[in-house]
Image (cartoon, rainbow, N blue to C red):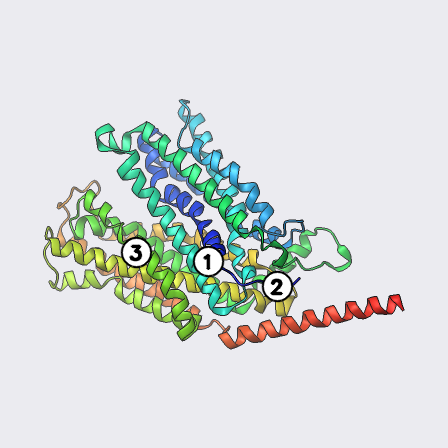
Amino acid sequence: MSDQPHLGFGTRLAYGFGAVAQGAKSNGFNYLLLFFYSQVVGLPAQWVSFAILIALVFDAVSDPLVGYFSDNLRSPWGRRHPFMYASALPVSLAYYFLWAPPEWSQEALLAYFLVLAIFIRTTITLYDIPSTALVAELTDDYVERSRIVGYRYFFAWWGGLTMAVLAYLVFLPEAKGGLLYTEGWRHYGLSASIIMFISIMVSSLGTHRHIPYLKAPSAQPNDEGFSVRRTARELRETLGNPSFLVLFAAALFSAVAAGVSTTLSIYFTRHMWGFTTEQIGYLQFPYFFSALVALWLAPKVTQALGKKPAAISITAVAVALAPALFILRMLGLLPVNGTEALFWIVLTHGGIEVALIITSSILVGAMIADVVEDSEVHTGRRSEGTFFAANTFAQKAVNGLGVLVAGQLLAWVEFPTGAALGSVSEETIFGLATFYIPVEWGLYGFAIVMLALYRISRAGHEANLSTLRARRSSVSDGQIGEHTGASS
């Protein structure tokens, strides 16, 4: 296999554009699905939430399996692309039918929903894990990896945000019933499914020409077949890499913190700042720009500081900045609710905070890519899919824990249910913020400590690449010698 050619803008664009599919799916599952099936379709909310949890469990289990098998697949189209192509049509069709349910009994609809939710999560995993793993194969350059991971996060955010804007402003007009307009949800599902199909195919086709340069799976001794025992041993060896373990732990703490923050954000936006639904919708627009800033910033700080120092610094700034407005409000240093100045302050603060969070996520993703060569030095195996799948698993597995923590905080301050705008006392809101701030700082603090234990610097990465080049050269020379001896 020859060295990987230089990545042009077209390849970066195609690779990144593939994340639109995951962004569109995640936006629907995380923000809209529970509401649609409980409020529009009419299933009990507890049924829907439990079905979503079951689908999430299936998804978390399938991630590492897909990662492992895509690491070890042998095919004319390499290790990743067969999975990517195979997922495009099934996941797109299933996503449309998820938003166009039949008129069945509640029990039958629950089964319909559960089967489709599991199927969609599994088939999008067939695409997303192998596709994400390509970052460590498309290039081994230290800075370039931050750049192409940046494209990935940029398009993931834009995909999700675009579908959210289309849903609220185009498909569900208030004049036709708003969020209860059934036909609008069908149009939403159809548009999302088409966008997901295009995203997957553009990314797969756009990176297809690189297949001859991608890494091949390591040869098994004596061409032994599949073995559960060997597979378990290899997974333990691979995931036991010290640098990956600390990134895995950092992902766990960050996911819990993100779950708390996401769950409580609507409470603060609605009741601390007193924003209307329309104003909350407008607050989403700066996030498009945030993703663009992160795309530009990540490779810059990688070049200037290195990934580990940059990730620690940017995460620390984001964590310190996140509750700043809550503290200023409790100190009486912000404009009062209902003023235009307050809206613009909150909008600007949110845009900056999200830009820093996306940048931090890009850097951590690029750090995981660098673990691949570090692991290969010690195990002799390329395990991109396994590493990225395990990181995704960590975030999915504990996401619900963050929601649970948020629920406990709401219970401790006795936050009222069904509270109308302006009806929650300042004491309750301030009490919630008083609990929330140390919880977030503590969780993200642990994540930063874990990042500090990461061992792979730029010099260490270059040393790993040198070791692997020398090893491949030695193997190649040995093969040439064997062939020469045979012919003589």
Q: Which residue is rendered at x = 39% and y = 32% of the image?
A: 99
Viewer-side residue, 126 vs 416: 126
Viewer-side residue, 377 vs 470: 470
Image mark count: 3
Viewer-side residue, 244 vs 5: 5
Q: Residues within 10 Å of mark 3 (few under 14, many from 20)?
A: some
Q: Which residue is rendered at x = 70% and y = 71% of the image?
A: 473
Percent coordinates x, y for residue 149 in the rendering: 45, 59
Give the label on residue 237, or none: 2
Look at label 3 and name its amino acid: Phe
With respect to residue 426, does 178 lie above or below? above
Quadrant location of residue 319?
A: bottom left
Q: Earlier in the sequence, mark 2 or mark 1?
A: 1
Quarter of the picture containing the N terminus is bottom right
Q: Residues within 10 Å of mark 2 (few under 14, many from 20)?
A: few
Q: Are marks 2 and 1 in contact (CB under 8 Å)?
A: no
Q: Does dot 1 land on a helix, a strand or a loop?
A: helix
Compared across the picture, whether 348 is left or right of 407 comes to left
Q: Nearer the viewer, mark 2 or mark 1?
A: 1
Q: Which residue is rendered at x = 10% and y = 50% of the image?
A: 338
Residue annotated with mark 1: 9
Q: Does dot 3 land on a helix, a strand or a loop?
A: helix
